[in-house]
Image: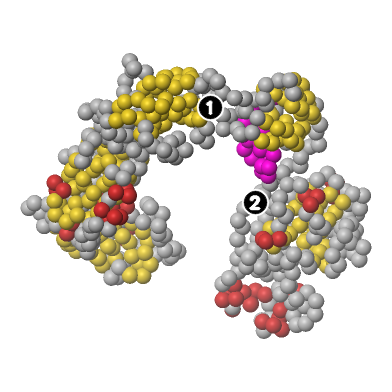
């Protein structure tokens, strides 16, 4: 499908021959090469078995194009056709799950009956990607490099052979590669028959259908008439049509508006069995929907009923004087999915005592029922939101036991201070509470008890994990509260946060009575036995480089220091002074022996520091290690 060599300016479609008889290429583009006859016959007898005939692609050129291209092969019982297009010239239906190839124009190569019996001549094929280097050495000095006229490859390169050229001039192949974005495989659609009609005497969306291919997977779907992706994607509503004929009603969603629609009878893989190109729909007027406040239930408990149940229906609350309700926003809301039921809404922390109104709405805010006015008084003991503090930055592992406030409930009001003591990297925020989603404000403070410098705000949502600024190293306490992001003083320009320090507070200061982050001995053997190569004390800060000079196989890490257990980071470097290639991270714990990567043979220095594995760039997918040499640097 995509082949070429030497300095050929165009790609060639290559067809290998076999002993299966005549196979003539139809409507081919001149220049048949290597065994092909002038009449396009790719079979020249037993003497040339396994020879190729080639057809030059002279239209829609994509050979060697930096923009790339699209190639397609259609293989049916009657024909084999090959197509190719530049990216911006591909047919409009190329992204379809069952594209119509009749609109693709003339193929670049085509084999059809009776000139070629594709079922007899071609058997199972293999899709292969192979960037070859040298083929026949005879052609190196015999054939024209551009396939037409002019010098040979031997003359152009000055090399006696292709192998010599590859060996002596590897720089010629620095950009020798190709990339594949995707491969898609389709099955030929079977020609089927069926019938689909709208029942004029039945309820809305009642269809009569018949098919010669009944199946338990067959179904009828409905789309807007102007939906260009139908029936290959989605549907506004559907139901199974399992019999060979019958009548079926598919209830329209509550969001279905008056207008023109179309319907399809489809198999399980969306093969079209029958279609109804266009019909009109007008929703019936609603007279049964109800919404009321339950006087005996908990706070904000509503009883509702609707003749148009849907999983998208919902009940929302607004202040009584809100003129935009229900077309915009809401104070609080929840889904009301059944045709009738009782639903308790969680009041927002910002809801004050006063008069409110409620609406039962469809997914597109179509009004189903309303409650024009009711009184609300907030309970005094409600919870705005809860948090669980975690040491890791992704809420993994257990809840942090080092923080005195590892599980915190925040009441409505001004909020609460949470001491993290350099031991919190993320907040797990459960879904419970009345603080609106997305409105949990996080205020960062330098010291415990929300004192010292203030470093600004962050925001989180209920039912999420919120990684914290500086991965937990830049602060010792948080003030947590419910608040609107647009109301904070930084966004309003009425306050300025303190500048971020060059050394974060949790790296710059030690715990009481301890001045060092950790202490270790480097040893030659991998089991922390034998002579000590170096003793190293690492102070608080960003860490320290240790030259190993191929003489260190393990680290004997003392118990002293205040680097958290399990969070001693080891960074491997190819050369001394932590330079050259970088080979990634390892981690160790205080009071352990840490055997080093490769037994010490593949690096000459280490950078050691206090750090969390969850916040390194490899874990977060923001960096890559250098390629490891096949021969260790210390060998």
* CB contact under 8 Å: marks 1 and 2: no
Return the mark for residue 183: 2
Percent x, y for residue 258?
A: 64, 33
Please check the rendered image and state whether residue 112 is part of the magenta-colored stretch, yes or no: no
Q: Is residue 304 above or below residue 258?
A: above
**Front residue (pair 9, 36):** 9
Q: Magenta part of the protein: which range?
A: 222-241
Disc 2 crowd, CA 10 A, few/some/many (<14, 14-19, 20+) = few
The residue tagged 1 is 310
Residue at the spot x=80%, y=76% of the render?
A: 148
Return the mark for residue 76: none
Percent x, y for residue 346?
A: 34, 29
Q: Is 600 on the left-hand or right-hand side of 99?
A: left
Percent x, y for residue 467?
A: 32, 47
Please check the rendered image and state whether residue 224 is part of the magenta-colored stretch, yes or no: yes
Q: Quadrant of residue 331?
A: top left
Q: What element carries label 2?
A: loop
**Front residue (pair 433, 43):** 433
Query: Which is in the foreground here, disc 1 or disc 2?
Result: 1
Residue at the spot x=79%, y=52% of the render?
A: 103
Residue at the spot x=16%, y=39% of the render?
A: 404
Q: In this view, does 589 lie above or below 131?
A: above
């Amino acid at each position: 499908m995509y082949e070429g060599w030497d300095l050929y300016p165009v790609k060639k479609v290559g067809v290998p021959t076999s002993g299966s008889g005549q196979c003539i290429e139809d409507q081919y583009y001149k220049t048949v090469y290597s065994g092909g006859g002038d009449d396009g016959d790719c079979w020249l007898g037993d003497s040339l078995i396994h020879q190729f005939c080639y057809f030059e692609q002279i239209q829609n050129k994509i050979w060697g194009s930096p923009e790339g291209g699209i190639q397609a092969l259609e293989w049916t019982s009657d024909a084999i056709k090959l197509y190719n297009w530049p990216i911006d010239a591909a047919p409009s239906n190329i992204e379809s799950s069952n594209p119509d190839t009749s609109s693709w124009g003339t193929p670049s190569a085509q084999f059809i009956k009776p000139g070629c019996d594709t079922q007899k001549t071609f058997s199972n094929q293999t899709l292969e990607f192979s960037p070859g280097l040298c083929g026949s050495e005879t052609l190196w000095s015999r054939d024209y490099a551009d396939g037409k006229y002019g010098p040979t490859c031997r003359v152009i390169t000055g090399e006696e052979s292709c192998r010599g050229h590859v060996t002596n001039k590897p720089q010629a192949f620095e950009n020798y590669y190709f990339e594949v974005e995707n491969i898609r495989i389709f099955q030929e659609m079977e020609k089927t028959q069926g019938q689909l009609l709208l029942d004029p005497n039945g309820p809305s969306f009642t269809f009569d259908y018949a098919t010669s291919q009944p199946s338990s997977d067959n179904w009828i779907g409905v789309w807007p008439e102007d939906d260009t992706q139908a029936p290959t994607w989605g549907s506004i509503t559907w139901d199974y049509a399992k019999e060979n004929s019958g009548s079926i009603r598919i209830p329209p969603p509550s969001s279905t508006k008056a207008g023109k629609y179309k319907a399809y009878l489809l198999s399980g893989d969306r093969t079209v069995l029958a279609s109804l190109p266009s019909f009109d729909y007008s929703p019936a007027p609603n007279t049964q929907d109800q919404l009321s406040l339950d006087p005996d239930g908990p706070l904000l408990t509503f009883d509702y009923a609707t003749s148009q149940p849907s999983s998208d229906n919902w009940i929302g609350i607004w202040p009584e004087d809100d003129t935009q309700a229900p077309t915009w926003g809401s104070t609080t809301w929840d889904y009301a999915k059944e045709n009738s039921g009782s639903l308790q809404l969680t009041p927002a922390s910002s809801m004050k005592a006063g008069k409110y109104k409620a609406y039962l709405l469809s997914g597109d805010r179509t009004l189903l029922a309303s409650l024009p006015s009711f009184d609300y008084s907030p309970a005094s003991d409600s919870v705005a939101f809860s948090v669980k503090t975690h040491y890791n930055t992704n809420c993994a592992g257990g809840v942090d036991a080092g923080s005195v406030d590892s599980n915190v409930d925040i009441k409505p009001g001004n909020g609460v201070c949470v001491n993290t003591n350099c031991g919190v990297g993320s907040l797990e925020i459960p879904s419970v509470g009345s603080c609106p989603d997305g409105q949990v404000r996080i205020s960062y403070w330098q010291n415990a008890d929300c004192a010292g410098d203030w470093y600004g705000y962050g925001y989180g949502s209920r039912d999420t994990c919120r990684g914290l600024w500086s991965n937990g190293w830049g602060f010792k306490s948080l003030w947590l509260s419910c608040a609107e992001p647009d109301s904070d003083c930084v966004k309003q320009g009425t306050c300025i946060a303190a500048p971020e320090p060059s050394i974060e507070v949790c790296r710059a200061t030690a715990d009481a009575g301890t001045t060092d982050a950790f202490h270790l001995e480097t040893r030659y053997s991998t089991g922390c036995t034998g002579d000590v190569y170096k003793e190293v004390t690492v102070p608080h800060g960003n860490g320290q480089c240790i030259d190993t000079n191929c003489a260190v196989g393990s680290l004997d890490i003392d118990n002293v220091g205040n680097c958290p257990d399990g969070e001693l980071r080891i960074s491997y470097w190819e050369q001394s002074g932590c330079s050259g290639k970088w080979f990634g991270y390892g981690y160790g714990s205080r009071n352990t022996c840490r055997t080093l990567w490769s037994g010490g043979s593949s690096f000459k220095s280490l950078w050691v520091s206090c750090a969390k594995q969850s916040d390194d760039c490899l874990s977060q997918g923001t960096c890559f290690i250098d390629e490891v040499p096949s021969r260790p640097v210390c060998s």
